[in-house]
Image (cartoon, grey):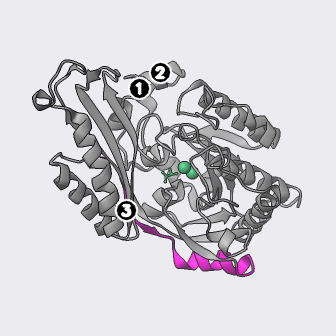
Amino acid sequence: MWADLAGIGRAPGDAGGYRRFVWSDADLTLREWFVGEANARGLGVHEDRAGNLWAWWGDPTAGDAVVTGSHLDSVPSGGAFDGPLGVVSGLLAVDRLLETGTMPDRPIAVVAFSDEEGGRYGIACGGSRVLTGLLPAERALALRDDDGVTQAEALRASGRAEAAFGADPEVLRTVGTFVELHVEQGRGLVDLDAPVGVASAIRGHGRWRFDLAGRPDHAGTTRLEDRDDPMLTQARLVLAARDAAARHDAVATVGKVLVEPNAVNAVPARVQAWLDARADDDEVVRAVVAEVAGAIGVEAVEESWTPRVDFAAGLRDRLVERLGGVPVLPTGAGHDAGILASVGVPSAMVFVRNPTGVSHAPDEHAETADCLAGVDALATVLEELAWE
Ligand code: HGY
Ligand code: MN
Ligand code: MN
């Protein structure tokens, strides 16, 4: 299964990693792969109104389903494990349970959430936010990618009707518990020398855009005192972000910048820069963003905000106990499990050790033995939750 995914959506050029943007050809191929794997197991496949794919074992209308899964899309030049490990592990855990020859007392599903990374349209967990109504369909459809293509246009190009795109309360209601397996994006499990762990919380995190206007002019003939160069403000933005994060217990990143006209010999007309800021405390994130905006005198336009989520202690501790006392650790990475938890769906996460902690980069890795330990843990958890 892993080898089947390895060739889908490789990033162009020598950057390495994957480029699996929602509604791209890579995404559509990944969706076909998911449907094929589900059909091969006799699981019923359903795509909900938000574009998320569900593979069902049992009748979803029975409700109180035990759902696992993650996402198949990636950040640009992302690693192989962030997302797909949770989907593959979910299918393999179901294989283990199918082998028992007994039917679960609750329906079980493996879900592939759409557009978790927001790599194309900029909003984290797009598919689960639309599913739950946290992101209105009209706003989602109007989002434009860096080439100016709206999600509505991309949806139509994929053969889907935008009129049908939106929240899907009927599907959401079928979910009793959601458990997402994910490669750890950090070194917590390495430092604890443990292959598997359970999440305690997801730190609050958001994305803000800064529109920096300038006056385009010739790089060689325009005197310095005559310039209105937005790249100078951009430089102050990056340094202000690092300074504010360092002074607070936060992290801040300016990883995406669009420059117009992006010419070596022209003073830019416009620079757009995105700030990703995260902290244990939501108010700290807000303070960092406000300080950055104040430092450069430019409004921070909020594009995506995910409040801190503390996973329900009862479910968390039940999994820890069932898994024999594995470590419990927070994460600074957002996940669909956090979105479902934020709308009241009992949710939990199982982490698999990442030997370097590196993620959102081609070097992201997890050892096969640890991945199989993750499948064992997930099968154990699903059995615990889906059988009386
Ligand atoms: O950005 C995140 O934290 C997640 O990987 N989407
Ligand atoms: Mn990610
Ligand atoms: Mn992820």
Determine the residue positioned at 83% across, 60% down. Answer: 369
For the residues bearing labels 2 and 3, Cβ distance under 8 angstroms: no
- Label 1 neighbour load within 10 Å: few <14, some 14-19, many 20+: many
Among numbered discs 2 and 3, the one appearing first in the sequence? 2
Q: Is residue 333 left or right of residue 282?
A: right
Q: Secondary structure at mark 3?
A: loop
The residue at the point 68 percent across, 69 percent down is 190
Which residue is rendered at x = 46% and y = 41% of the image? 118
Amino acid type, callout 2: Arg
Q: Are marks 2 and 1 in contact (CB under 8 Å)?
A: yes
Depth check: give the residue in front, 68 or 387.
68
Real-space Cα distance between discs 2 and 1? 6 Å
Helix, strand, or loop for circle 2? helix
Q: Quadrant of residue 257?
A: top left
The residue carrying pointer 2 sits among few (fewer than 14), some (14 to 19) or many (20 or more) residues within 10 Å by Cα, namely: some
Residue 326 image-quadrant placement:
bottom right
**Residue 29: horizontal and vertical position, in percent?**
67, 28
Would you name the residue on which mark 2 appears? 156
Q: Label 3 crowding class (10 Å Cα cut-off): few <14, some 14-19, many 20+?
A: many
Segment colored magenta: 302-325
Element carrying mark 1: helix
Q: Which residue is mark 1?
A: 152
Q: Which residue is mark 3?
A: 307
- Give coordinates of residue 290: x percent, y percent: 21, 58
**Distance from the alpha carbon under mark 2 to that under mark 3:** 32 Å
